[in-house]
Image: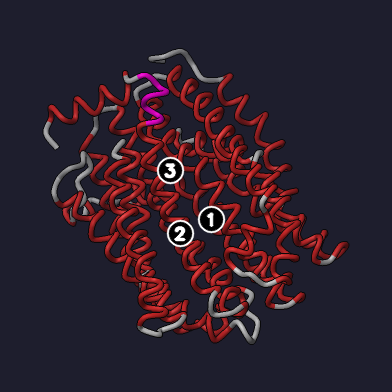
Amino acid sequence: MSKANQLQQYQKMTTLPIPRLVISLGIPTVISMLVTNIYNLADTYFVGRLGTSASGAVGVIFGLMSIIQAVGFMLGQGAGSILARRLGQKDEESAGIYASVSFFLALIMGVVFTVTALILIDPLLDLLGCTTTILPYAKKYATYILLATPAMMCCFVLNNVLRFEGKARLAMIGLVSGGILNMVGDPIFMFIFNMGIDGAGLSTALSQYISFMILLSIFLLKKTQSVISLKNFLKITPSKTWEIFTIGLPSLVRQGLSSISIMLLNQCARNYGDSAVAAMSIVSRISFFFFAIGLGLGQGFQPVCSFNYGAKLYSRVKEAFKFTLKISGIVIGIFALCGIFFAPFLISLFRNDPLVIQKGHLALILHCIALTTHPISVMANMTFQSTGNKLPALISSMMRSGLYFIPVLLILHGLFGFVGVQCAQPLADLLSALTVMPMITKFFAKLPADGK
């Protein structure tokens, strides 16, 4: 990118009115999140045509995909937060080094993960919560997901680097292209080519590699400030690697605990049959789809927060937080109401099985009520991570799916059976929001005046 374009980008990030800036960066991210989740829902929908056990398999593998996402987000968010603050300080060279280190680490770790998981696939799927009837479907689907793991991890890194640079539209192009191809590929491979669940897995794997190539081409064509190259990667040092890992650790913890929580949820739900596993899988997908819209707006806030924090424009950080919290709260509230009033219909779209609908109905209503607490929890965690406040970021990332969810799930399941399983996540969400409020209030109270 030319010096003139770099200066133009700097002025945009530090002078454009906050509502306009957050919306301009948030809308492409919302679109990306929507398409990504629509194609996840497409897998759930089309695989659901194969039966309840097949539908449960998608929910089980969602835990595996959460592990992959955890590593990719750790590297991408860690590098993104650092490079955005470096760009705010007009240090483009360091930004390129951090971007390159995170990209090549993702590629290496993706290959290692694929080989290891394929060797240990049977015990891994048992750990993820497979029943004996779900296992055959899950094993086929997981194989394709694992083969696509290097591309998936690299996509998460490239996407986050682009977002933190303020290039949300370019990030959207890569993710949306792959998502649309996956939605088109599912019915073609599954039903026209009669591949069944193999077709869903193959479609997902191909779409991930296409997204990877599109996102990488943006960097190779030098449309970014951060230059990804082997030369920059060879400037890797233990301190730079450690900085990426520690800043990105909250993402790893958040996503990793999410994966563990899905495993535990499936372990508890499978005591009540495949219909219970399928019901909780569908409820999780629907509620996360609603949540993703608010999350997309929050991810539009992250580069604004990091960039202006690096430039010491703290008043813009405060303004961006308040604006994004208000908008995401309104949007999520609207979708939560839709989920509450149309819960049985929404579940039936993915598996029109009376048992699945019955077991998912209460769970979806409770999840949607709890969605209204998500904006404050997510925005606080994003603020801490984007500004390099490692300990508060780590603590806030552990709450929803770890510190609260795991003990709440085990206690409620022991006391109330399947009803406890349905109630666990909503209660954990409420406790997380109540805990993080004083933390984020204290953070903003201590911010200095601009320039100090």
Which of 203/111 is in front? 203
Residue drawn at (36%, 43%), measured in percent from left and top? 80
- Per the image, label 2 sits on a secondary structure element best described as helix
Q: For residue 283, what is the image quadrant?
A: bottom right
Residue type at mark 2?
Gln
> Is residue 172 left or right of 425 when viewed as pictured?
left
Return the mark for residue 30: 3
Residue type at mark 1?
Gln
- C-beta proximity under 8 Å, tags 2 and 3: no
- C-beta proximity under 8 Å, tags 3 and 1: no
Residue 91 position within the rendered picture, expressed as x and y whole percent measured from the top left: 24, 32
Q: For residue 424, what is the image quadrant?
A: bottom right
Residue 54 position within the rendered picture, expressed as x and y whole percent measured from the top left: 56, 78
Q: Earlier in the sequence, mark 3 or mark 1?
A: 3
- C-beta proximity under 8 Å, tags 1 and 2: yes
Q: Earlier in the sequence, mark 2 or mark 3?
A: 3
The residue labelled by disc 2 is: 69
Residue type at mark 3?
Val
Which of 372/390 is in front? 372
**Vertical relation: 45 (above or below) 230:** below
